[in-house]
Amino acid sequence: MAMCVKGGRTAVVLLGWLGGAMLATTGFAQPTAMPLTVLDTRDAAMTQPGATTASNMPGPYVPGPYLPGPYMSGLPPQIVPAAPPLDEPMPSIGPPAALPNSAAPPDATWTPPWTWQVLPDGLMFKNYLASNEEGRLGSQLYYDKKVGWTWDGSLGGHVGIIRYGTQDPAWPDGWQLDVDGVALPRLDSNRNMVATDFRIGFPFTYREGKWEFKFGYYHLSSHLGDMYMLSHPDFVRLNYVREQLVLGVAYRPIPDLRFYGEANWAFHVDGGAQPWEFQFGIDYSPSQPNGFWGAPFAAINSKVEEDLNYSGNVTVEAGWQWRGPTGHTFRTGLEYFDGFSFERQFYNQYQQFIGAGVWYDF
């Protein structure tokens, strides 16, 4: 019995020693095989996904307060605090203020857009100031030594219908279709109607910079007054008619000065008219609005007609004008005319007169 008790004690001691040895061996081997993130709870910052170590930082670092444990082999992980703010400014991604030996680019020029416009303000090809057959409003009093006093009028207008161009009402650029019409009555000193010419057309006009162009169809006819026929029974009435195509070109070396020329070819004529006519001239007219005081103007126009074996007439005007912000112009001044009459019922009669008038151009 004593031997059994002694043997049992010996067996218990041996089993306890073996169990303690196995537990010690297992507890020492497991930390070596398991990852650090599972067992290391010494610093929460070290186990965060965004933690930065010395292995991927380009600059110096400061070791943290971590102390290695007895179970770690090799170098302990290092924790680097956030980088301090830079004292120098961040580099600019823009171009440098100036490059060596580089020229500054030219200034950009803004170009107004071209748009479609219905019933636009302003004209691409303005009326000839000294022409007596333009579409405008006007009234003139003339004196001729042979005829005496006459009163001439201009009852018409010249306006745009449709435009593709800029929206400047005074000096637009672009393409424009116009309507140009006028009645040109003449009354004698007794205020009886002598004759009336009618002119209407549809010019297609273009302007860009200093150049102006027009091309279109015009109708021109002349009609003798009833009272004049009664008081001059021997006068033969003319059925003067021109159905014509018109091509005009104008050039402005400066905004206030314009040189122009025009050719008219009639595909249908009657009453003594012939196909070809030409006119040319110079206009001086301040181009900017000039307020209450206005500014001087001057103009000369000359016409050459195949009707008269390429003779014609010349008109000179000078006076004072007022120009509005949309380009409309009111003028008053003196006029001198020398040549064959611009009233087509009397196209082959020579006249020389001086007069005064007022004119309003759209």
Image (spheres, grey):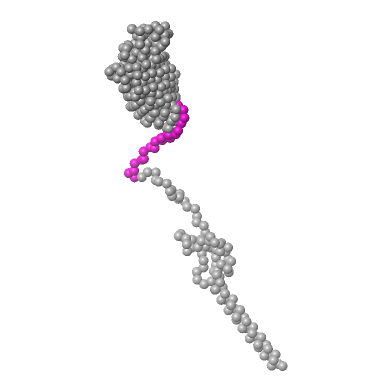
Counting labels gives 0
Q: Is residue 268 above or below residue 107?
A: above
Q: Quadrant of residue 100?
A: top left
- Of all residues, the one furthest to the right in this rendering is 1
Rendered image quadrant of residue 23: bottom right
- Determine if residue 360 is in view: no
Q: Quadrant of residue 149?
A: top left
- Please report the residue visible at 52 percent of the width from the left and 62 percent of the height from the top: 79
In the drawing, does residue 276 fall left or right of residue 324? left
Foreground of the two, 108 or 362: 362
Question: From what the image shows, is residue 327 above or below residue 72?
Answer: above
Q: Which residues are magenta?
A: 100-122
Q: State the residue lying farthest toward the left.
A: 309
> Viewer-proximal residue, 20 or 135?
135
Residue 313 % position (x, y): 31, 16
Residue 219 visible in the current orientation: yes
Residue sitting at x 40%, y 31%:
175
Q: Residue at x 34, y 43 (%)?
A: 102
Q: Which of the image's four quarters has the N terminus? A: bottom right
Residue 333 spot, x, y in % from top left: 38, 14
Find out whether residue 117 is within the magenta segment.
yes
Depth check: give the residue in front, 189 or 166: 189
Q: Position of residue 210 (x, y in %)?
A: 35, 29
**In x, y percent, where is residue 4?**
69, 91
Q: Residue at x 37, y 10 (%)?
A: 142
Main SS type for the magenta part? loop
For the C terminus, which image quadrant? top left
Q: Is 120 a magenta residue?
A: yes
